Image: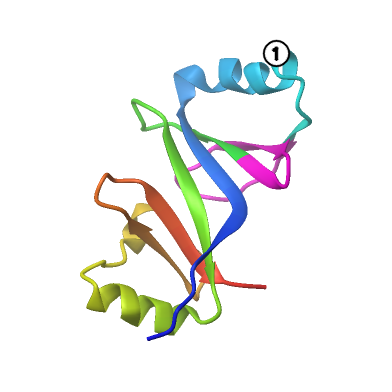
Amino acid sequence: MNTKFEAGINIAIKIPKNKYESTVAFYRDILKFDVEERSINNPTVSRTHEVKFGNNIIWLDCVDNYTHSETWLQLTVPNVEQATKYLQSQGVETCDEIEQLPENMHWITDPAGTVFNVQQRG
């Protein structure tokens, strides 16, 4: 199967609620990045801020039930269904239960537990 994975522009940092305000302030006030709060309707993310990070976007996501932060990355593919079949043939299962996603996207993890969002290249 000839599936080509590419890095997407989105990086999400899942931040425990008790560290959220100080983390937003770090990016905004210390690093002086453009930081803007965005509305979000997600059962596991209570707030989110968008940070322009060069050609990428960091999403600072406030998660009420986390005890430590995690960094999640975006992968883009030409065809999500083919990529999913390829990943499964390599022993990589989707784990879409970790956070709500639109259709035709999947969550996967690497062996170390890093979370990746696999979605259609636009």
Left or right of 90, for residue 23: right
Q: Amino acid at mark 1?
A: Ile
* Range drawn in magenta: 37-58
Q: Residue at x 61, y 41 (%)?
A: 59
Looking at the rendered structure, the secondary structure element under dot 1 is helix
Q: Nearer the viewer, residue 35 or 4?
A: 4
Residue designated by label 1: 30
Q: Could you tell me if residue 39 is visible in this image?
A: yes
Q: Does residue 113 lie above or below 35 as drawn? A: below
Instruction: Give coordinates of residue 114: x percent, y percent.
Output: 36, 46
Quadrant in which the N terminus appears = bottom left
Instruction: Give coordinates of residue 93: x percent, y percent.
Output: 26, 67
Q: Residue at x 46, y 18 (%)?
A: 18
> Which color scheme did the rendering employ for the protein?
rainbow
Q: Could you tell me if residue 100 is visible in this image?
A: no
Instruction: Give coordinates of residue 53: x percent, y percent.
Output: 70, 38
Q: Does residue 95 lie above or below 111 as drawn? A: below
Q: Is residue 93 magenta?
A: no
Q: Is residue 47 magenta?
A: yes
Q: Residue at x 45, y 39 (%)?
A: 71
Q: Residue at x 57, y 20 (%)?
A: 23
